[in-house]
Image (cartoon, helix red, strand yellow):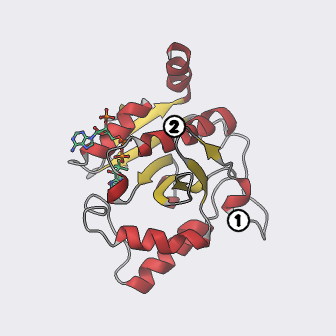
């Protein structure tokens, strides 16, 4: 249902080789590489940043290994993590588009920014072209975002992107938001 026409990349390639770069009004949204992992580690060290994020790592070595695994994939072609920067290459977080929890079957969109970058509309600005890519280039049927209750900022991003509350499947403790390809096209036609 989710990967119409896309396969996995051959050996030797990484997710970054199949991910486009997006340039927005204020941001550069580019494929994550191992060189970005130190900034991710630093960002995740802020308890406010991970307040609504389940943390599967138990120590710094585990955390580093988790970051490396998530950067390396593999994921379906065109999916992965994108690093967000400003024009001076300052790290402003990431957006992901991968099988949910790296397993699937749904495709998940997600976002995480260092606290200093919150409240400026960056997450929405960075995620918008990634969502468009999911539907217009990859031809996905739907994209989900699973958010823990209380994470109003993340729900705000989902809502601004046009994702809607989806209660078809119990994903507790998360609340699921979904955008369908049809919904995306209808929204694009009216905006
Ligand atoms: C979630 C997160 C990425 C949002 O980043 P951001 O760049 O500040 O988001 P945006 O500015 O694009 O949009 C957030 C929207 O939610 C709203 N919002 C933010 N905090 C809010 C709150 N406490 N209550 C209600 N609305 C809130 C904002 O006002 C904004 O909407 P608006 O533009 O209509 O005013 C950022 O807070 C973050 O990295 N949090 C930690 C990691 C995380 O929780 N990731 C998501 C896991 S599901």
- Rendered position, 83 above or below 46: above
Residue found 26% across the figure and 68% down from its top: 47
Please indicate whether residue 185 sits to the left or right of residue 145 in the image: right
Quadrant observed for ligand 1 in the rendered image:
top left
- Name the residue furthest front: 88
Q: Position of residue 27 (x, y in %)?
A: 54, 46
* Label 1: which secondary element: loop
Residue hosting label 2:
128
* Number of numbered markers: 2
Q: Earlier in the sequence, mark 2 or mark 1?
A: 1
Residue 135 % position (x, y):
61, 34
Asked where in the image residue 166 lies, by quadrant, the reply is top left
Mark 2 or 1, closer to the camera = 2
- Quarter of the image with the N terminus is top right
Q: Is mark 2 within 8 Å of ligand 1?
A: no
Disc 2 to disc 1, how far (Cα)? 23 Å
Whether residue 176 is visible to the viewer of this picture, yes or no, is: yes
Q: Residue 8 at what x, y percent from top left?
A: 72, 57
Residue 14 got which mark?
Answer: 1
Instruction: Reply above or below: 110 against 70.
Output: above
Along the line of sight, which residue is nearer the eye, 1 or 65? 65
Residue 118, relative to residue 33: is it above or below? above
Tag 2 secondary structure: helix
Q: Position of residue 146 (x, y in %)?
A: 37, 47
């Amino acid at each position: 249902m989710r990967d119409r026409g896309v396969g996995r990349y051959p050996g030797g390639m990484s997710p970054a080789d199949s991910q486009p770069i997006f340039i927005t009004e204020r941001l550069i949204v580019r494929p994550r590489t191992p060189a970005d992992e130190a900034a991710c580690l630093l960002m995740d060290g802020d308890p406010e940043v991970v307040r609504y994020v389940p943390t599967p790592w138990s120590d710094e070595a585990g955390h580093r290994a988790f970051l490396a695994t998530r950067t390396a994939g593999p994921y379906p072609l065109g999916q992965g993590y994108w690093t967000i920067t400003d024009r001076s290459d300052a790290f402003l977080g990431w957006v992901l588009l991968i099988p949910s929890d790296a397993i699937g079957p749904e495709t998940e969109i997600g976002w995480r920014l260092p606290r200093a970058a919150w409240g400026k509309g960056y997450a929405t600005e960075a995620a918008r072209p990634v969502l468009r890519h999911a539907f217009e280039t990859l031809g996905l049927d739907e994209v989900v975002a699973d958010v823990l209750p209380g994470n109003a900022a993340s729900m705000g991003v989902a809502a601004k992107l046009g994702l809607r509350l989806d209660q078809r499947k119990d994903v507790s403790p998360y609340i699921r938001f979904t955008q369908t390809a049809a919904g995306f096209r209808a929204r694009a036609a009216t905006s």
